Image (cartoon, rainbow, N blue to C red):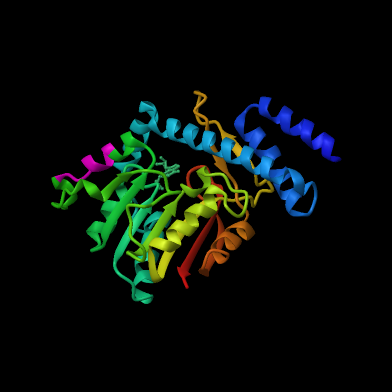
Amino acid sequence: MNTAKIADLLTDVEKIRPLEKKFNILRQLLYDTGADRYQDHEPEIRHKIEKVSSEIEKEVKNYYERPKIVEGYLKIGKRVRDPSGWEIKNLNKLIQLVKENNVTESILDIGCGYGHDVIWFEQHGFEAFGLDISEPLIERARTLYEPDTGITDNDISRFIVGSMTDMHQFDDASLGCVKMDASLYHLPYYGNDSPVNLTIRETHRILEDGGVIYLRVHSVADGENGFMELEQRGEDLNSRYGQNLTSEEVRDMLESNGFEIIELLNERQGKRQRDWCSAYARKV
Ligand SMILES: C[S@@+](CC[C@H](N)C(=O)[O-])C[C@H]1O[C@@H](n2cnc3c(N)ncnc32)[C@H](O)[C@@H]1O
């Protein structure tokens, strides 16, 4: 494509909807500039992709603040989980890794939703915190600190409303472990300086040396493309933005931001038997 055509495309892209289609085009253009094509346009492409990324983040927040969605998550949060099921197995594995790496028994659950895992870690002797972009979900998480959880410390500073791209509430090297289960993939990924990479860098900053990170994202084992997708759940158009990431992308985002991979695996999990990429890594 010649440079005049790119200029036209960059004007036309403004009208493109839905947002993920616009994002996909810009992301491909950005990747092509990285391969030494139409480099002069890189600042403009980057500016546009940053703008569409922040629009997507707002849409995700709106989705997770809808009353129907909040109520649905609260119901899931109250269910009793099978102690031998994969969810609890993953949490136990994190406890084991924290012990093996001799770091503090403290955890931040990023995208904690209704906070069920924060409570689980508290009940297992950890100092646990939850961060989520959705205000109503965090409000609900706070109410889960009820007498029947066996937790009497009702310090609401445990649950913070905010985006994972900025975790200023946490000091450098202040935590032994960070968990991001089914949350990181809501942020756009386009390599360096994308919101996903900013989040991984923030996570590195707040972890102690040897601290453990666990993340789980939608992956592409079925050959779906790696760009943003719009999910449709149920009869309503309950759309939310998400993104499939390849295991190579997950490896690269961790290794290029100061983590050493402990384990990286692709598995089919959950009711809908989707492909997920899970990664356990330590700060080096
Ligand atoms: C699919 S839910 C997963 C909830 C929980 N981690 C679990 O596994 O049950 C995704 C969560 O990530 C949160 N989230 C999405 N984007 C976020 C962001 N930029 N910063 C913090 N939380 C975010 C949502 O509000 C939602 O609670």
Q: Residue at x 46, y 69 (%)?
A: 282
Q: Residue at x 13, y 46 (%)?
A: 147
Q: Residue at x 27, y 37 (%)?
A: 139
Which stretch appears magenta?
139-146
Residue nearer the viewer, 234 or 55: 55
**Residue 282 placement, left or right of 41:** left
Residue 237 appears anywhere in the view: yes
Residue 89 appears anywhere in the view: no
Name the spot of residue 110 as percent of width and height, x first: 39, 51
Tell me, yes or no, whether the highlighted magenta stretch contains residue 145: yes
**Residue 53 placement, left or right of 160:** right
Residue nearer the viewer, 236 or 213: 213
Name the spot of residue 227 as percent of width and height, x first: 65, 43
Name the spot of residue 113 as percent of width and height, x first: 36, 43
Q: How many labels does the image show?
A: 0
The N terminus sits in image quarter: top right
